[in-house]
Image: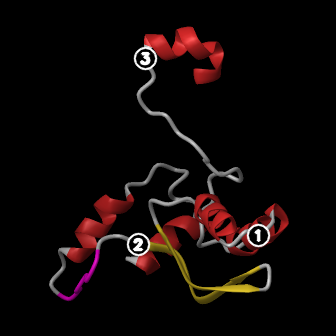
Amino acid sequence: VDALFGFFSANELFQKNWDFHGVLHQICAMDMVNCKRHKALKHYDGNFTMGEVSVGPLVIWEDQEVIDVLYSIRRDYNLTEEHQMTSFIEICKKPEVPCDRSKAKIFEKTEITKLDYEKFGNETC
């Protein structure tokens, strides 16, 4: 699953709207293939260091954004934005690691109602 994910990313197949999970399902259905998991690792580092602080293993799954995971580490270890962005650049320069955003989500509200709009106006859009 990780090799297929890297292949999709390196060849920009996600941007071409290829169905990663559909292809994965077809490959895993083959008798000669044994798929132990169906969720890909986007990036893994067994001993990740950010800003000269060893934070242990870094695991970023396919459904996570690199910048969001790094922001969480930055906040947990009281590091700087420069440390975060240096790590972001190092990880995202790899063609097999897709990075869709360079700004972390620090808050997300998914259920926006008419009352929210009346209170916050266009800030909810």
| Whether residue 56 can be seen here | yes
Residue 79: numbered disc = 1
Are there few (<14), some (14-19), or many (20+) residues within 10 Å of tag 1?
some
Q: Main secondary structure of the magenta part?
A: loop
Give the number of the mark in front: 3 or 1: 1
Above-or-below relation of 50 to 13: below
Does the magenta-highlighted stretch encompass residue 34? yes
Q: Which mark is residue 105?
A: none
User: What range of the chain is rendered magenta?
Assistant: 32-37
Question: Badge 3, how many Cα within 10 Å: few under 14, some, many 20+?
Answer: few
Circle 2 — which element?
A: loop
Q: Position of residue 1 (x, y in %)?
A: 37, 76
Q: CA distance from mark 2 to mark 1?
A: 28 Å
Looking at the image, tell me whether mark 2 or mark 1 is earlier in sequence order: 2
Q: How many marks?
A: 3
Residue 26 among those drawn in magenta: no
Q: Which mark is residue 40?
A: 2
Amino acid of disc 2: Ala
| SS type, badge 3 | loop
**Disc nearer the start of the sequence (3/1):** 1
* Closer mark to the observer between disc 2 and disc 1: 1
Q: Mark 1: which secondary structure?
A: loop
Relative placement, left or right, of 45 versus 50 is left
Give whichever of discs 3 and 2 has the lower sequence position: 2
Residue topped by disc 3:
113
Relative vertical location of residue 8 with respect to residue 14 in this rendering, above or below:
below
